[in-house]
Amino acid sequence: MKYDETRVKKVIAEVLEIESDSITKDGDFIDEYDADSLKVLELLASLEKEFDITIPEGELKKFNTLSNVQKVLEAL
Amino acid sequence: MDDIVGQLLTQKYPFRFIDCIVDFEKGKNIVCKKNVTINEYFFNGHFPGNPVLPGVIISEALAQAAILLYKKSGMDEKNDKEYLLKKIQMEYLSKVLPGDSLYIHVEAEKMFSIGGIVNVKAKVNEKIVAKGKIIFGAVDKGGEANE
């Protein structure tokens, strides 16, 4: 895995303002962690900064769980 | 002279806080200018005998410049979006007074169809008087920013 899960979870936790330990693989960001579309945009931008990568806008709709975020990152 | 700011911004007097665009690079950054004048209504109360530009007005000017960057970069070609503030992180460093020319610098961090993230700075005489980050939503008119 190119992208360390601990680092990914840390970024998600900071942006969504939740505890890293509370993030599960399939926990939905909007339904379970009270995020909205702009929080997810902020998450995408933060992950880009964290890993010095560019994530296309088309991937935004897949940014709904830790598991799906990891799949997007690994496919870059 | 065309008032491109007036054409692009839905905010009008007394809530328009950008006078003109000074510089622009599509998709990347914009520099706007606001001349601060004693005639502005809020100086009557902020504060009597000691006029100081309110920080929230600086923030609003920065947000309006962000909208101009977004629109001039072609992100709202049909001109059918509303712009809603989502999150703002600001630090205010110096007072801005009547007579100052406020230069508003906005740099795009991310611009997508649903909104944008920008880094912002306001300067007077090249000195940074405020800086921060703004996240805004661009929604179809009548929509909500947090959908």
Image (cartoon, grey):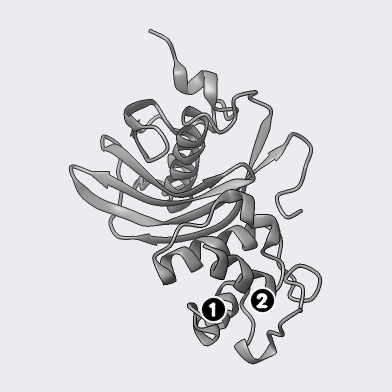
Q: Residue at x 39, y 26 (%)?
A: B19
Q: Quadrant of residue B65?
A: top left
Q: Quadrant of residue A36?
A: bottom right
Residue closer to the observer: B7 or B107? B107
Judging by the rendered image, the residue that carries numbered circle 2 is A66
Secondary structure state at the residue bearing disc 2: helix
Q: Residue at x 65, y 23 (%)?
A: B78
x, y percent for residue A11: 53, 76
2 or 1: tag closer to the N-terminus: 1
Tell me the amino acid under the disc marked 1.
Val
Q: Residue at x 42, y 31 (%)?
A: B18
Local crowd at mark 1 within 10 Å, few (<14), some, or many (≥20)?
A: many
Q: In this picture, is A21 found above or below A64? A: below
- Which chain's residue wears label 1? A
Pointer 2 and pointer 1: residues touching (CB < 8 Å)? yes
Q: Is residue B94 left or right of residue B120?
A: left
The label on residue A8 is 1
Specify the farthest residue to the top: B1
x, y percent for residue B107: 37, 46
